[in-house]
């Protein structure tokens, strides 16, 4: 295995950091959305307090014997109330209670009865961004006597100063809440997501560096999606480790078998030359057993040849061309059953074409036909069947069927139902079909015969309105 260096992400780009900044950003956005209404509410509360203080100052004036006070007391009442002028309205009657000369004109009027929080927030932000000391008129009901409406005029600078303090307090509070929530969410997400992901990553990297080594199992306590991923990863690693262990030993065994086969072929070739001379022996008993000996040696040589060919063959190299399936079936039938081609019924439409390697498909059909005939079949039929995704060829025979013991490993090499068979025919056929993008499968088997299905992928139309090969075959048939 390649000992490639495993690069860990930078702390600033790690999943933990991204989760932390994402959490802080989300909480900050939430606090900003809350900050505006909070500032608007503080604005309204400040003005309501001035309304209440101004009403109390006006009541002090009404409590005087002649409802008049001297200039010094009036100045003190206005200063304590924080306003420049106070007037009361009762039953559509306006009474000017306290006032000092105004040093400007009123630039804004706020009616607390009709001003909402959002409008107050906008007014507060406008006031904070302005440095002009303007006059503001405020009208609102008295908190002690709702039927009395208090009308006041005040300077904006004290309001701006108090709103700035309230805004700073709200910002600090928002930052504190964001930091606390971000840290809490970071710890929770780090425990629930980042920690298991790091365990998964360590396990994957360790398995890549040394797949066959025993490794510490990944904890599998969670029942969520990550827990399922951990369990599936552990199961996959165990299966791959067993498969690699088996393949490494099979590879060593295959190398040994290849060397043995090579030497055995030389020995059997010499034995074949010697045994061939036995047919001309003067002893009739020797001449009688010679054909049996020659047949046994021929089978041994064929086994060695096929075993070596299977071991040496790599992935098949295909020369794909438009190929008519009916002609391949006919050629393979003539080769598998010379002199009796009628034993193989070719029902494939003559114009049916696929993109395939003719020689390789010939090997597939030839292996299937020979297997069926050697198993005892008297008739074989080949017909086409179309599905939404594949073009299938059904190879049916009337043989005795396949034994139950070989069905599960039917396409494995060196598994055969015939005495002296190599079991490579179906294995080679499957490799060739998969190289074409298709597959071969056993559809059914029993006393009445066996059916294999060769599946070819349906080819997409290259141009709009162009007929597919199957459509052409259907039209010409």
Image: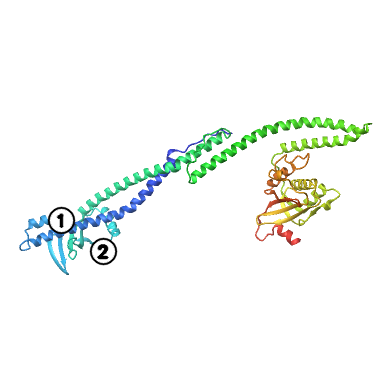
Residue 114 is labelled as 2
Q: Position of residue 252 (x, y in %)?
A: 67, 32
Camera-side residue: 179 or 184?
184
Please give the residue where the numbered disc 1 appears in the rendered image.
81
Camera-side residue: 468 or 230?
230
- Spatial CA distance of label 2 from label 1 is 23 Å
Q: Is residue 204 above or below residue 59?
A: above
Q: Position of residue 439 (x, y in %)?
A: 68, 48
Q: Is residue 76 left or right of residue 269?
A: left
> Could you tell me if residue 209 is visible in this image?
yes
Q: Position of residue 349 (x, y in %)?
A: 76, 57
Q: Secondary structure at mark 2?
A: loop
Please tell me which of labels 2 and 1 falls first in the chain.
1
Q: Image quadrant for the N terminus?
A: top right
Q: Residue at x 64, y 35 (%)?
A: 246
The reply to whether callout 2 and callout 1 are in contact (CB within 8 Å) is: no
Question: In terms of image quadrants, where is residue 467?
Answer: bottom right
Question: In terms of image quadrants, where is residue 71?
Answer: bottom left
């Amino acid at each position: 295995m390649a000992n490639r260096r495993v690069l860990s992400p930078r702390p600033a780009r790690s999943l933990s950091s991204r989760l932390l900044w994402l959490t802080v950003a989300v909480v900050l956005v939430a606090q900003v959305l809350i900050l505006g209404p909070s500032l608007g509410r503080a604005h309204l509360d400040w003005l309501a307090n001035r309304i209440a203080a101004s009403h109390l100052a006006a009541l002090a004036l009404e409590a005087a014997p002649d409802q008049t006070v001297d200039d010094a007391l009036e100045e003190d009442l206005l200063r304590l109330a924080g306003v420049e002028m106070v007037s009361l309205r009762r039953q559509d009657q306006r009474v000017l209670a306290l006032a000092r000369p105004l040093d400007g004109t009123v630039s804004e009027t706020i009616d607390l009865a009709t001003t909402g929080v959002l409008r107050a927030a906008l007014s507060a932000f406008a006031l904070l961004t302005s440095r002009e000391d303007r006059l503001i008129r405020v009208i609102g009901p008295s908190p002690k006597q709702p039927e009395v409406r208090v009308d006041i005029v005040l300077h904006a600078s004290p309001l701006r100063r108090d709103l700035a303090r309230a805004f700073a307090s709200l910002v600090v509070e928002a930052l504190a809440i964001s930091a606390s929530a971000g840290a809490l969410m970071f710890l929770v997400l780090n425990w629930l997501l980042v920690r298991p992901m790091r365990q998964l990553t360590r396990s994957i990297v360790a398995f890549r560096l040394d797949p066959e080594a025993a490794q510490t199992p990944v904890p599998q306590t969670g029942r969520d999606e990550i827990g399922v991923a951990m369990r599936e990863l552990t199961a996959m690693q165990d299966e791959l480790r067993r498969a690699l262990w088996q393949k490494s030993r099979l590879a060593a065994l295959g190398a040994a078998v290849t060397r043995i086969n090579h030497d055995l072929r030389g020995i059997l070739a010499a034995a074949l030359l010697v045994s061939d001379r036995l047919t001309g022996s003067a002893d009739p008993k020797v001449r009688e057993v010679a054909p049996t000996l020659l047949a046994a040696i021929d089978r041994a040589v064929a086994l060695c040849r096929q075993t070596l060919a299977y071991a040496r063959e790599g992935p098949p190299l295909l020369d794909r061309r438009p190929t008519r399936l009916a002609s391949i079936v006919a050629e393979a039938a003539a080769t598998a059953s010379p002199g009796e081609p009628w034993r193989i019924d070719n029902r494939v439409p003559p114009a049916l074409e696929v993109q395939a390697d003719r020689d390789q498909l010939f090997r597939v059909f030839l292996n299937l036909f020979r297997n069926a005939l050697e198993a005892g079949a008297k008739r074989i039929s080949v017909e086409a069947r179309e599905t939404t995704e594949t073009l299938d060829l059904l190879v049916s025979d009337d043989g005795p069927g396949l034994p139950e013991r070989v069905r599960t490993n039917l396409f494995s090499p060196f598994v055969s139902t015939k005495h002296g068979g190599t079991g490579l025919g179906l294995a080679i056929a499957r490799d060739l079909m998969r190289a074409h993008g298709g597959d071969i499968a056993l559809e059914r088997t029993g006393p009445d015969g066996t059916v294999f299905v060769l599946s070819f992928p349906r080819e997409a139309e290259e141009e709009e309105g162009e007929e597919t090969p199957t459509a052409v075959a259907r039209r010409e048939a």
